[in-house]
Image (cartoon, grey):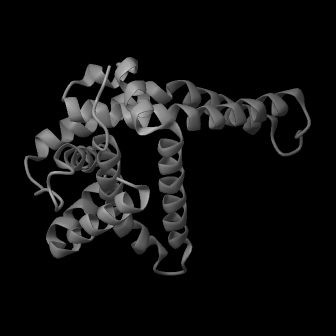
Amino acid sequence: MRLEENLKDSYEYTTKLFKDIGRLAILIVLNIIPIVNFIVTGYFAKVIRESPRSNAPPVLEKYGELWIDGAKVFIVMLVYLIVPIILVGFGAASAMVAGPFMPATGLALFGGTLTIIGIVLTFFILVVAVMAVVHMVKTGKMGDAFDFNAIFSKIRAIGWPNYILWIFVIFVIGLLLSGLSAIPIIGWLIALIISPVFIVFIGRSASNIYEATPTTK
């Protein structure tokens, strides 16, 4: 499946969320409640699991199972990103301690350097982490999120250029959509609605690219 076909299919799939406004409203509400929003993350995993064989977003049910699946995704992402999170955290803290009146001090430069390294590292780790999550959901085994042989084999089968291009396009789409939140008065409402919708779009698109090639080890 070419990238444009993937995006078109994911768009058409995601628009079907609006055929059940009740389901969409529940996803929006759940998504703004900390910890409870694992249910929405679990729904994202369900979209991955059922795609591409299903042509419409899944029924929103079995909230406990969705929460557990969402918690698994959260834990895996946390493990992958723990190092850059620490780097960015220490970097930001160092910059705050240095303060605006000491921007050229060693502490400020140290903090800025750590932050930049953390951000760059985040991007490179996410390249692997995204496929790791999809692979875990597809196999149903949490440990498979760290089966690097299978993960890199899948990416090689897709093609690194194709895979990186897909991630870049998804990132740009997300960036453009996040910009809508800056619209005066109604921006916050648009952001609330778009967030779970975009999550479903990403899940469908990620599953499409994963299933486009056979899994090899």
State the residue lying farthest toward the right. Answer: 104
- Is 90 displayed left or right of 130 in the figure? right
Whole-percent x, y for residue 34 in the image: 33, 47
Whole-percent x, y for residue 146 in the image: 36, 20
Residue at 47% across, 38% down: 159
The answer to whether any part of residue 143 appears in the image is yes
Residue at 81% across, 41% down: 99
Residue at 35% across, 66% down: 8
Viewer-closest of 94 and 63: 63
Q: Quadrant of residue 27?
A: bottom left
Viewer-closest of 105 and 80: 80
Whole-percent x, y for residue 194 in the image: 38, 67
The quarter of the picture where the C terminus appears is: top left
Viewer-closest of 185 and 98: 185
- Is 123 displayed left or right of 211 in the figure? right
Residue at 26% across, 51% down: 40
Viewer-closest of 98 and 88: 88
State the residue lying farthest toward the bottom. Answer: 185
Whole-percent x, y for residue 126 in the image: 49, 36
The answer to whether any part of residue 73 appears in the image is no
How many numbered marks are there?
0
Above or below 186: residue 160: above
- Is 19 displayed left or right of 89 in the figure? left
Above or below 84: residue 201: below
